[in-house]
Image (tube, rainbow, N blue to C red):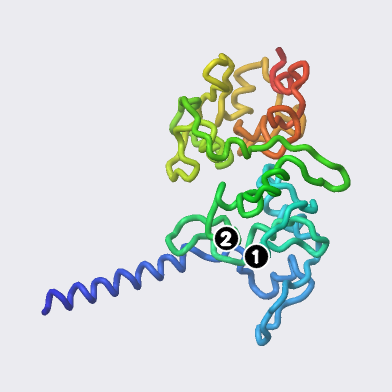
Amino acid sequence: MKNKLFFIILSILIITFSTIAYTVINDVPHNFRLDECLQCHISIPDETKKIDKPMRFTDNINRLCQRCHKEDIQLSHPVGMRPSMRVPTDMPLDERGEVACSTCHNIHQKRDDILGDKNYLLRRNVIGKAFCMACHGKDEGKKNIETFSLGMRKTIKPSHREFLTEAHGFKKYRVIDSSSPIDSISIECLGCHDGTIGADTQVTIGAGVWQHSDQDASSHPIGIDYPAAQMNNRTLRPMEQLNKAIKFFDNKIGCGSCHDPYSNVSTQLVMSNKGSALCLECHKK
């Protein structure tokens, strides 16, 4: 009887501690003080009244998000465009009927789900391919992964659709420095394109070398500190001289330095490589 009581008390303590720890760790990242609401909203909410519709913003919501999330917006789903497929009702468009950051993200929810997994503030309890297929899973959505309106211009987009269920046959990424982690966007890319690294992996992946294909001798480093490399290799141009389309992640090279999954340039490069233009941005020869 005593042993049974002991385990009951122990279980209660463990559950209580876990709940407290989860609450402390899993805070709401946009849970500001009332006076801080004015950073994004034109008024302060009345806590005595139920808020049944979104409060008005001081500016376009995408610009507001970009004040803190500049790097994320550079390599994310296009916003400010009117989708030509039907979007689920739980993923609201803005007042102009265009896709906004808040279409996919519930800005004021907790950062993790009840199991402690990252939810990226998404409006559904799935991430990755499963989330994308909410809009792009239907025939009309699949078609419009490739073609949609961007502002007033019709844009043809290369599609990731054909790769969503494809397994790649050989390891393309080789870690050379496990002490120097690569950026999160590159990890997401390797999750599909390397074929041996899970997209939802929780381990740190070190800097290494990417081989473009099993029949292609070309390769490129990922996770290398560019300014440090440029200091030791004078055939590289200084970072400040490079085209702004080329992005770095804490000064490191990533997949997103040369590629943008939403680019309409061949092989989804951040700029045309005609005449090796992209390569020659960094390499003098």
Foreground of the two, 139 or 210: 139
Quarter of the image for residue 258 reads top right
From the top left corner, tell me how far across and down residue 252 is, in percent.
60, 33
**Left-right relation of 274 to 18:** right
- The residue furthest front is 139
| Dot 2 crowding, Cα within 10 Å, few <14, some 14–19, many 20+ | some
Give above or below for 13 relative to 233.
below
Residue lying at 54% horizontally and 15% vertically, measured from the top left:
215
Nearer-N-terminus badge (2/1): 1
Disc 1 marks which amino acid? Answer: Asp
Give the residue number, with chain letter if any, for mark 2: 124
Res 183 label? none
Foreground of the two, 7 or 239: 7
| Dot 1 crowding, Cα within 10 Å, few <14, some 14–19, many 20+ | few
Give above or below for 67 relative to 154.
below
- The residue furthest bottom is 48
Do residues under tags 2 and 1 come within 8 Å of each other at their CB atoms?
A: yes
Residue lying at 53% horizontally and 60% vertically, measured from the top left:
125
Give the residue number, with chain letter if any, for mark 1: 90
Quarter of the image for residue 219 reads top right
Disc 2 marks which amino acid? Answer: Arg
In the rendered image, the quadrant that contains the C terminus is top right
Identify the element where label 2 is drawn.
loop
